[in-house]
Amino acid sequence: MLLLDTHALIWLATDLSQLTDAAKSAIRFHVSELHVSAITALEISLLTKCGKLKWGRRPLSFFEQALKQHGVKEVPIDSGIAWRSAQLPPLHRDPFDRIIIATAQAHGMTILTKDRTIPTYPKTKVVWE
């Protein structure tokens, strides 16, 4: 099972050239097992609101269409994932990434991300390069 980081979902839906060959290969291999954390909807919404993502559509519409178009399943955030994210070592402070890491650990998923800090977390598998 493959858990897409926020940027990986955005690039899958908008600009495949941003994905590495290894990332594209992992997506093809896991095509029926692509997942995204529900926290990604919040992150996309906030990035749009502050102007870091600029497009002519509402963030929720983009998120829902991207999931539907690529067969990506949304993984909800429950109290176990929230608790697990707070127990992670303080390697970086991004709460979105902490939820994504905790989600992957809780469900035995590999994370598709270019983030170089995420693979330094214990028991965390990453694909990018």
Image: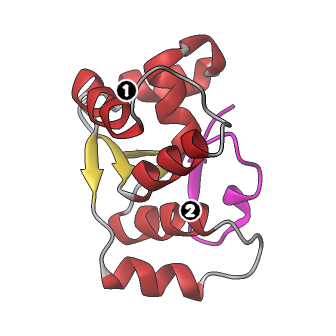
Q: Position of residue 57 (x, y in %)?
A: 41, 25
101 relative position to 109: left or right: right
Q: Is residue 118 magenta?
A: yes
> Looking at the rendered structure, which numbered label has been put on residue 106?
none
Which of the two marks, 2 or 1, is nearer to us in this view?
2
Q: Position of residue 125 (x, y in %)?
A: 56, 55
Q: Is residue 29 magenta?
A: no
Name which quarter of the figure residue 42 lies in: bottom left
68 relative position to 45: left or right: left
Which range of residues does the magenta coloring cover? Answer: 111-129
Q: Can see residue 35?
A: yes
Q: Which residue is mark 2?
A: 96
Using the image as rendered, state which of residue 73 and residue 21 is in the foreground: 73
Label 1 element class: helix
Q: CA distance from mark 2 to mark 1?
A: 25 Å
> Is disc 1 surrounded by few (<14), some (14 to 19) or many (20+) residues within 10 Å?
few
Q: Which residue is mark 1?
A: 29
Give the quadrant of the C terminus. top right
> Is disc 2 surrounded by few (<14), some (14 to 19) or many (20+) residues within 10 Å?
some
Q: Position of residue 19 (x, y in %)?
A: 61, 22
> Residue, x 39% and y 33% (percent of image)?
58
> Residue, x 45% and y 87% (percent of image)?
83
Q: Can see residue 5?
A: no
| N-terminal label among 2 and 1 | 1
Q: Is residue 74 above or below residue 63?
A: below
Q: Amino acid at mark 2?
A: Phe
